[in-house]
Amino acid sequence: MDMSTTESVKEVLMKESQTFRDLVHQHETYEERLSELASLTYPSESEQIEEVTIKKKKLNVKDEIYAMMAEYQKSH
């Protein structure tokens, strides 16, 4: 997918799919929390574990987003 196609597919799915919007929102929420954790000078062990866990969850959500985009592009 080139960048213009990616953006147009994303725009359509943002308008048409609640599931897609939820995934994008979840991805943004994870990104915000990772920014908070990254700003800590001395994160605790639990915060370090949380960071790793959130990174994995964020990657899974990103994979779901791109899978939905690829499926949409195939069907249209």
Image: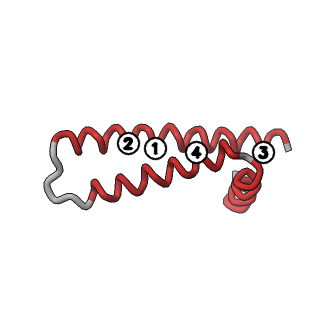
Q: How far separated are the C-alphas under marks 2 and 4? A: 14 Å
At 17% from the left and 50% from the top, the residue drawn is: 43
Q: Nearer the viewer, residue 41 or 17?
A: 17
In this figure, which residue is indicated by the disc labeled 4?
23
Instruction: Point out which mark residue 58 bears.
Output: 1
Q: How far separated are the C-alphas under marks 4 and 3? A: 18 Å
Q: Secondary structure at mark 4?
A: helix
Residue 47, image x, y percentages = 23, 45
Identity of the amino acid at label 3? Gln
Q: Residues within 10 Å of mark 4 (few under 14, many from 20)?
A: some
Instruction: Point out which mark residue 74 bears.
Output: none
Which is nearer the N-term, disc 3 or disc 1? 1
Which is in the foreground here, disc 4 or disc 1? 4
Q: In the shown orientation, is residue 64 left or right of residue 18? A: left
Q: Quadrant of residue 32?
A: bottom left
Q: Secondary structure at mark 1?
A: helix
Q: Are marks 1 and 2 in contact (CB under 8 Å)?
A: yes
Which is nearer the N-term, disc 4 or disc 3? 4
Q: Are marks 2 and 4 in contact (CB under 8 Å)?
A: no
Q: Quadrant of residue 36?
A: bottom left
In this figure, which residue is indicated by the disc labeled 2?
54
Q: Residues within 10 Å of mark 3 (few under 14, many from 20)?
A: few
Q: Are marks 2 and 3 in contact (CB under 8 Å)?
A: no
Q: How far separated are the C-alphas under marks 4 and 1? A: 10 Å
The relative height of residue 73 versus residue 3 in the rendered view (above or below) is above
Q: How far separated are the C-alphas under marks 1 and 2? A: 6 Å
At 49% from the left and 54% from the top, the residue drawn is: 28
At 71% from the left and 42% from the top, the residue drawn is: 70
Q: Are marks 4 and 3 in contact (CB under 8 Å)?
A: no
At 46% from the left and 43% from the top, the residue drawn is: 58
In this figure, which residue is indicated by the disc labeled 3?
73
